[in-house]
Amino acid sequence: MTTQITHFSAFSGIGGACSALKEAGIAHKTIGISEIDHLATIIRTAIIGDSATNIGDINTANWDKMETPYLFSGGFPCQPFSVMGLMKGMKDPRATAMFSMRKMILDLLPNYILLENVGGILTARCLPQLMKFLQSFGHEYSYSIHKSNPNDLGFLQSRTRVFITLSRLDQTPWVIGKLPTKKAETWADLVDSKLDNSFFNVKAKPRITNSKFIVSPSSTKWACITKGAILSQCGRTSWIPHRSAYRSPTTSELFKLFGYSNFPSLPLKDGISRSSISRGFGNSWHVGHAALVLQSLPLPTQPTQLKLWSKS
């Protein structure tokens, strides 16, 4: 029998890490989050339903009175390492949040850390900077890097992600092994049989009308989903035929595309809009993918394993 773990979620967005812990069946309490997008936190509350304190911008936050969480998670800003963000790496001003996150981690010394980012962080241009950053934890933590794509595991969404685990040196090292696969999902498995009004109509045709990203019931791959990508006719967008034009995914389709097995309805009110939902999911972890990763987290079997560790 395992003991409930405590969890802090940095860059929490709509709560992908918290939902993944639930999806993985891990008993946990999220003791705090850090998020600057007010609308994302509204959606997170609607999905998660907890009362975790938001400490706000991690660059200016105060965590002096916070207890040490067993697990610290953070999908730190991807723009410095993505192609769309021009891959400026640590020279990108948004990378400052990584160093603020490191300060928080080294102040609190959680047992384990799970970080998430885009595949571009492992390119020849960005990898040396990442390695230097990870090695700066060396006196307190070991680390391991895992790269995978949920589509290769049977999920419809194709979105290569890098997960980085850090294990405090007095803990069993957390290394993510080969993840289990399932029967490949198709768009027919996820599509809503009855549409509500929680989607965008897209009247323009995509530039390449025979693009492989125009989905059909038998499609087993899905690419980008954000409103901005759809309306700008991004080449990686998956286009859903709708009447004589196209549409974006509905809210419930988005939940399913991100690997949720159970999810609430999100009424379009009180700050929750089609636009905020689309943006929130566009910045979210793939919950099904992350849940498989979290299943390898070493868990405590007794409360004494949650004890703090003094800095070296």
Image (spheres, rainbow, N blue to C red):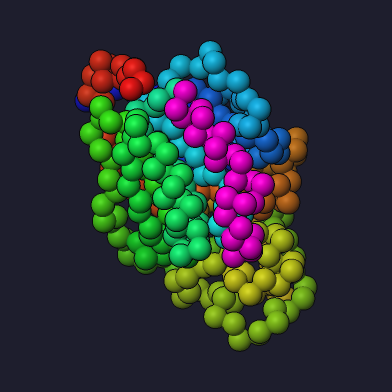
Q: Give residue 289's position: percent from left, percent from top.
A: 41, 52
Name above or below for residue 122 compared with residue 101: below
Quadrant in which the N terminus is drawn: top left
Can you name the residue that lies furthest to the right here? 203
Between 312 and 122, the one lying in front of the other is 312
Q: Taking the image as drawn, is residue 151 in sight?
A: yes
- Image: magenta residue range: 83-107
Q: Residue at x 60, y 20 (%)?
A: 62
Task: Tell me which secondary structure the magenta stretch mostly adopts.
Answer: helix
Q: Give residue 292's position: percent from left, percent from top.
A: 34, 48
Q: Residue at x 63, y 63 (%)?
A: 86
Between 152 and 91, the one lying in front of the other is 91
Q: Taking the image as drawn, is residue 46 in sight?
A: no
Q: Residue at x 33, y 22 (%)?
A: 312
- Residue 291 within the segment the image draws in magenta: no
Q: Give residue 72's position: percent from left, percent from top.
A: 44, 32
